Image (cartoon, rainbow, N blue to C red):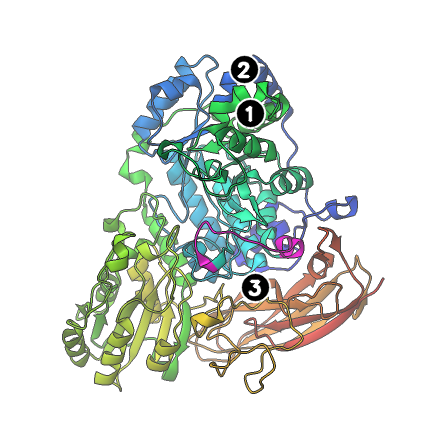
Amino acid sequence: MKRILSTTTIATSAILATLVGGSVVAATTVSQSSDEQALAPARTPASRSIEQKVDVLLAKMTTKEKLEQVQLLSDGQINDAEAKNGVGGVFSLTDPAQINHYQHVAVDDSRLHIPILFAYDTIHGYRTIFPVPLGTASSFDPDVAKSDATIGARESATVGLKQIYSPMVDVSHEPRWGRIVEGAGEDPYLGSVMGAARVKGAQGDSYSDRDKVVSSVKHYVAYGQPEGGRDYNTTDMSEARLRNMYLPPFKAAIDAGADTVMCSFNSLNGVPGCANKYTETQILKKQWGFDGFVESDYTAVSETRACPPRTPDEGPCGHGTAADGPQAGANALMAGTDSEMVSTNIRDYGQQLLQQHRITMSRLDDAVRRILRVKYRAGLFAHPYVNQAKATDPASFLTADDRKAARKAAGESMVLLKNSSSTLPLDKSKKTAVIGPLGDSKHDMLGPWWGRGQDSDAVSLYDGIKAVDPSATYTPGCTMSHAEPPEAATADDCSTTTGFADAVAAAQSADQIVLALGETREMSAEAEARSTIDLPGKQQELLDAVKQAVPDKPIAVVLFNGRPLTLSKVDETAPAILEAWFPGVEAGNAVADVVFGDVNPSGKLPVTFPRTLGQVPIYYNHEPTGRPCDATQKYNSRYRDLNSCDPLYEFGYGLSYTTFSVSDFSIDQSRIGPDGKVHATMTVTNTGSRAGTDVAQLYLHDPVASISQPVRRLRGFERVTLDPGQSRTIHFTVDRTDFGFYDNRGKFVVEPGTIELYAGDSSKASLRQTFTVTR
């Protein structure tokens, strides 16, 4: 594990095995037959001593106490009475004194002394905020994700939290969806690697350790592909697409040791995620052997109810698969949901549902057993309380080493999209003008889901630039609002040109210009879908005005955003574009590292950037069609008003301040059996004049199959750091977990025929080799 995690070598059939402790886990290991079960590593066997303790405790519990254990309350719902009654969990409470208080009430005053599991949304940091997960995925470096989760877990555990709602592993092809920022983008393989790394960072060898927490993988499942890109919306897809595209990152996270899972808001093929017996029980618990617990998302159980007729106090509703609260609770519990968040249908109606035989005691016992098992594994019974001295010591958080790790992560996560005439790096000896609404914002640098990070912790872009160039100036040009919906719809988001004259003057008085453009952090994350994904307001006009005023000066656009944007006009105007995402607490320093050349950018896009919104959804791993896009012909899969079939920037794309070539692609076998392996090699050479890092990428295509297969599927990657003129040979291995796939019966199949492999450093990889799988 250490070799690959430290060098970020990602060998196709070995990477996930490395992350989960030595067994082979690839992106397609959901199984039904005994043969397929062999593809997946067995989860760690249950501890006999823990199971015995759970048995003893469960035998003592009354039905009411069992129903309390399956209840998960928010920080606004918990009180002494709830704690004394034996509530199972509490989320979003982060005050260590209050956590200790309620834990003492639960342990000292409840009949059975069962501790509470406290949880929080530590998504990309608790106090030390790392780049948003979509940015981290751009690093193609699992060490970055692991470091983020390790530090976030330590800081979370310090205040008394023992569960984090992370990683989010939803694959998404939908840039309009605000929550795309929380995941690893559009590829299930990359998502699997990053998800597994986050679990290992958060949990370590044992999440009972005082600086570790248990991970909750979310949102189960297919939440990332909502209709119209609108949050909470429905998803509908084939069995094959579900298993090949959306389930793999969940499987990888579970195999890495994640012991809790959050079921999703959306319905899948008409069945709500938190009432879906097929996904929760059949796949997760039976096929994958998951013995942890599933908690619902916020009021997701209540939201399965039909809305009319109802009274105002009945709470959320919508999906219409349950007539009322009792049915919602019964459906959720019997489907496999073990813990209900915020809404209280299972707890409130449990006694009634048991009497009516609408739920079973065995299923309720199973849910409670899973929750208690996790609490024992977390060490809560042995160490339930917070060390308040440590929890209130500023030295416990945001240390110098933590900042160093966050700065390194941010630097690796940035993607150089364009660099005409070597505009970047800028000259440290020349005067720099920082222009743009995000140029001196600390607030936005933390991005959405900023944990307990504080604006004052962050380094703004201007601060970072000025630390290198003391003569640097800042002019906003226009301002961006941080209003939340519905006020945001009428907010002033760079809607006037009033400040453009000052911006032009600043550009004219400087030698080089950095334009800080993009979205505010409020424009990304949950409930932040956008109907357009252009630069908000008049930011393009600001860029145009500066470019027109100083056409011959170096101009670099630095983008802060949580989703792919349509940047065709920016690409036409700006000589250089650096995608920085929301880089976290060390944002300004990390951007300065890159734009002044102390760090050579090495990020690659984890998600496709469309030319225009009309191309959405557009993603590299799409299925082929009988009439593929050809912009020069009529009767094919094209747009009449777009003269290109390609995105603006493809998956896996990213430039450097040096250049690389990939050559000498070869494989060791041309024919293998269905259980055989092929070893592939490629050579990466630094053909430029400075040291840099490239990401070698291996893709696979099955051109003839019983079910049409994606035109490309990422099956391996490796970060390669090289001096000028230096070369390195990279090795990958592919096997049945790579060229096999799931059919629409949910069966994993390996079919005979030709398999194509492609090597390069983006999804447009052109070097090709083929081999044949025999019967």
CA gap between label 3 and label 1 equals 43 Å
Residue depth check, mark 2 versus mark 3: number of the one nearer the observer: 2
Within the image, what quadrant is residue 583 found in? Answer: bottom left
User: Residue 123, position in %: x, y?
Assistant: 41, 47
Q: Is residue 408 above or below residue 683?
A: above
What residue does disc 3 label?
Answer: 718
Q: Nearer the viewer, residue 430 or 173?
A: 173
Badge 3, how many Cα within 10 Å: few under 14, some, many 20+?
many
Badge 1, how many Cα within 10 Å: few under 14, some, many 20+?
many
Numbered range of the magenta stretch:
228-244
What residue does disc 1 label?
Answer: 368
User: Residue 161, position in %: x, y?
Assistant: 40, 33
Q: Amino acid at mark 2?
A: Met
Q: Amino acid at mark 1?
A: Val
Residue depth check, mark 3 versus mark 1: number of the one nearer the observer: 1
Q: Residue at x 40, y 65 (%)?
A: 414
Residue farthest along the right direction in this orientation:
775
CA gap between label 2 and label 3 equals 52 Å
Q: Are marks 2 and 1 in contact (CB under 8 Å)?
A: yes
Within the image, what quadrant is residue 664 found in? Answer: bottom right
Q: Are marks 3 and 1 in contact (CB under 8 Å)?
A: no
Q: Amino acid at mark 3?
A: Glu
What residue does disc 2 label?
Answer: 61
Which numbered disc, 2 or 1, marks the residue that appears first in the sequence?
Answer: 2
Q: Residue at x 36, y 36 (%)?
A: 92
**SS for dot 1:** helix
Q: Quadrant of the C terminus?
A: bottom right
Q: Residue at x 32, y 42 (%)?
A: 397
**SS for dot 3:** strand
